[in-house]
Image: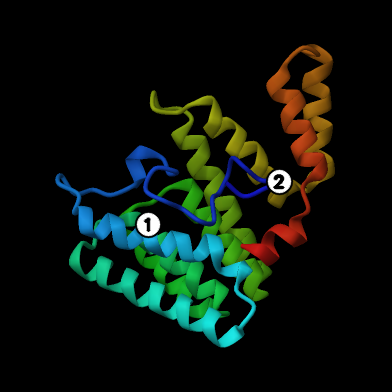
Amino acid sequence: MHANFPALYNNDLSNDSIRNDFLYNTKKPNKDLIIINDNAVKVLQEINSVSDLKIKESLLNKAMNDLTKVIQIDSNFYVAYINKATILRRLGKYKESIEVQQVLLKRKKTPEEIFGLGVTYEKSGNLKLANEKYKEALAEYDKYLKTPRATSQDMINKQFLMIFIQGKDKVLKQINSQLKKNPDNTELLMNKIIIEEFNRREFVSSF
């Protein structure tokens, strides 16, 4: 989970850190592909400790090529798309990252991934398209929250998304209003602390 923003989006996704309905659509997941994906995740998790830029780029490119092969073998291995898009962002290849995310959204549309595409647009400097995606993600959350599969975590995710739509101050004002009615709600208190500490610029930069 990303520090300061634990609920909404996980940059380095392993096969057991993501919502079960999103992982993959295959009836019999290929264990070899899972290993390749998890190795790519390890690269993402450890890459910041690599000081040599050439070695760092080489490791990221190898992981990206491995994930490309995973997708070619099993186009329904959804988490491989997410990790590949993350690697492309780390390489500064925002256009290619956006293209991977768009392909994924055609196969599996979730509010988390629409939000992720929005952040990539924001990271690339396209705030207009970023804001469009944030609003689209909000509409998807509103629909999903009406289904029996929705959880309290989805409601929290929606609340974090509102930071990108309304701004942190308005979201905190809403939480404070809720706390007046329910001051002992520990979930609200934790959300308030996390949102108060959240730095949008740092989050987008590290995404």
Q: In the picture, residue 48 is in which quadrant?
A: bottom right
- Choose mark 1 or mark 2, whichever is in front: 1
CA gap, disc 1 and disc 2: 23 Å
Q: Residue 56 versus residue 74: which sits nearer the camera?
A: 56
Residue count near mark 1 (Cα–Cα under 10 Å), binned few <14, some 14–19, many ≥20: many
Q: Which residue is drawn at 67% across and 75% down?
A: 125
Say which quadrant the C terminus sits in: bottom right
Q: Name the residue under label 2.
A: 4
Q: Is residue 23 left or right of residue 33?
A: right
- Residues tagged 1 and 2 counted as in contact (Cβ below 8 A): no
Q: Which residue is drawn at 54% across and 79% down?
A: 56
Q: Residue at x 48, y 26 (%)?
A: 151
SS assignment at label 2? loop
Q: Mark 1 points at which residue?
A: 38
Color style of the picture: rainbow
Q: Position of residue 131 (x, y in %)?
A: 64, 60
For marks 1 and 2 on the same chain, the one whose residue lies earlier in the sequence: 2
Q: In this view, does 156 lie to the left or right of 15?
A: right
Q: Residue 194 versus residue 178: which sits nearer the camera?
A: 194
Q: Residue 144 versus residue 32: which sits nearer the camera?
A: 32
Q: In this picture, is 73 found above or below 34?
A: below
Q: Position of residue 76 (x, y in %)?
A: 24, 57
Q: Position of residue 87 (x, y in %)?
A: 49, 71
SS assignment at label 1? helix
Q: Which residue is drawn at 58% across and 80% down?
A: 92
